[in-house]
Image (spheres, rainbow, N blue to C red):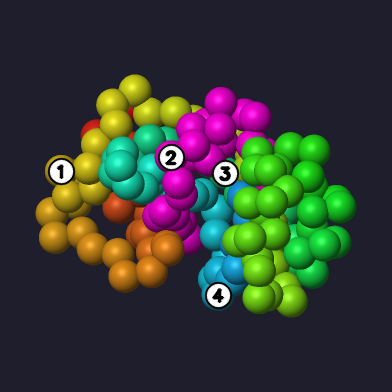
Amino acid sequence: MNVFLLIKPEYAFAILKGTKRYEFRKLRFRRGVEKVVVYATSPYKKIVGYFKVGRIHQGSPQMLWNQFNTHAGIDKKAFFSYFKSRSLGIVIEVKNPVSFRRHRKPREILPGFSILWSFRYLSEDEFKLIKRASI
């Protein structure tokens, strides 16, 4: 299973450059995820690449910060602001990030594409269409 994940542009590009090795989330995926398609949110609003999912960790925000801050790609204030009222958080290890040569809007590739939350599961066929249209 693959996921289409909305990420702020500064973090999306840091992931693809390899300086942000961990992506932080408030909720864990309900299904096993192999690859994450990275969508840089407003003002960029385009698919910019993908990465393979490494290990997924769960813990308190303080524990996650202590363990993963070195390559978090986010400063301490923004990190704790993101998790402000949460007792648990998720860390997704970023493996083998790939930056797409052509950044595209989702509906240019998948007509009628919509997303209601911060992520959307993608079929393998949808992932292949996105990859083929963007490389």
**Residue 6 image offset from top left, x and y in percent:** 42, 53
Q: Quadrant of residue 61?
A: bottom right
Q: Is residue 36 visible?
A: yes
Q: Quadrant of residue 105?
A: top left
Residue type for callout 1: Glu
Counting residues from the N terminus, which is met first, the one under dot 1 or under dot 3? Answer: 3
> How far apart are labels 3 and 2 at the CA level?
19 Å
| Residue pointed to by mark 4 | 30
Q: Secondary structure at mark 2?
A: helix
Q: Secondary structure at mark 4?
A: loop
| Residue pointed to by mark 2 | 9
Quarter of the image where the C terminus is located: top left
> How far apart are labels 4 and 1 at the CA level?
28 Å
**Residue 37 image offset from top left, x and y in percent:** 43, 47
The residue at 47%/60% (across/down) is: 1
Q: Is residue 54 visible?
A: no
Counting residues from the N terminus, which is met first, the one under dot 4 or under dot 1? Answer: 4
Counting residues from the N terminus, which is met first, the one under dot 3 or under dot 2? Answer: 2
| Residue pointed to by mark 1 | 108
Counting residues from the N terminus, which is met first, the one under dot 3 or under dot 4? Answer: 4
**Residue 97 image offset from top left, x and y in percent:** 55, 33
Q: Nearer the viewer, residue 128 or 18?
A: 18
98 is higher (above) or lower (below) than 44: above
Of tags 1 and 3, which is closer to the observer? 1
Residue type for callout 4: Arg
